[in-house]
Image (spheres, helix red, strand yellow):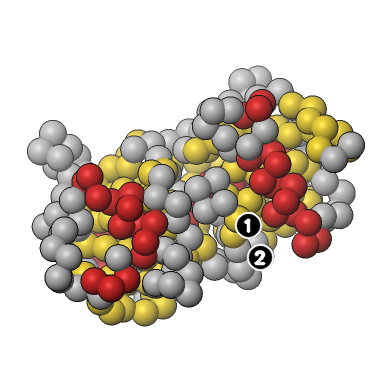
Amino acid sequence: MNDQASIPFWKMTGSGNDFVVIDNRQGIVPDTGRGAFARAVCRRRAAVGADGMLFIEDASPRDQQHVDFAWRYFNADGSEGAFCGNGAMCGARFAVLHHIAPSRCCFQTPAGIVYATVDQDKPLVHLSLEPPGPVQPPRELDIDGQSHALIPILAGVPHAVLLAQEDTFGPDFPAFGRAIRHHDVFAPEGTNVDLVQVRDRHTLRMRTYERGVEAETLACGSGAIASAIVATARGLAAPPIAVITSGGPSLDVDFTWNASTLQATDLSLSGEARLVATGDICPEAF
């Protein structure tokens, strides 16, 4: 990366889950420097600020016949994430608006190929995704003297879902999420943490503590997937499921449920991917 050059960026948000998006097809940010670059630029108040950073790149020669582009995601702490639902929706819309891909496109992620349909008139994106891992047995954890049943599932990245009658944590949820995220049961990788209330058979309310952001975020696409599937596995919900986030707009999850294997197939995620701002990242921000 040329320390004297400004780098064009887009700021995008998916239901309040916000990202800095870089067209990196020319390698303006080299592979060895992406984590540090993302960590510097995602600092709130000191730089652009975001939950994470997306790099849109050319697919490898091996994959160019099968996908339109490659997608990479780095959390605000500089760690790379294999998948991010809202980030995937924002990346797809970015690629379409930059004429990198058609409105019906597919792209490579570390978690597998994602198929996307980007609305031409509205900031809406529909994703077709690889099936997540099976719902795992609950893990009973003692946090501050209280027992909680966390249900793990791999939805591109690891999640632990807590189904609750109501949100009794209030402003203490980030501390609870941090304790679960770093609990020995989920070591060494750690986990995202989703607090879920069932509103009705097709509506959930979700709060998420995100690994890598190390804070509660306003929305989480993979968390919406994890929450919807776990609620279905427990007999509390059925697809399609609208997941209400703290950011406002819901994330819509649909799938075919196999009760015998406790797995979902034909998985899709739909939601908003809004453009917030465009500009140039100045060298002083690094």
* Residue 278, image x, y percentages: 31, 78
Residue 5, by quadrant, is bottom left
Place of residue 266 in the rendered image (x, y in percent of width and height, measured from the top left): 48, 38
**Which residue is most to the right?**
145
Residue 72 numbered mark, or none: none
Q: Secondary structure at mark 2?
A: loop
Residue 90 in view (yes/no):
no
Query: Which quadrant holds residue 2?
Result: bottom left
The answer to whether the residue labelled 1 contacts the one labelled 2, judged by CB atoms less than 8 Å apart, is yes
Identified at 78% across, 56% down, the residue is: 172
What crowding class fits label 2: few (fewer than 14 Cα within 10 Å), some (14-19), or many (20 or more)? Answer: some
How busy is the neighbourhood of tag 1: few (under 14 within 10 Å), some, or many (20 plus)? many
- Residue 43 in view: yes
Residue in the image at 59% along x and 38% along y: 191
Q: Quadrant of the N terminus?
A: bottom left
- Judging by the rendered image, the residue that carries numbered circle 2 is 246
Q: Looking at the image, which is closer to me, 140 or 38?
A: 38
In the picture of the structure, the residue carrying the numbered disc 1 is 216
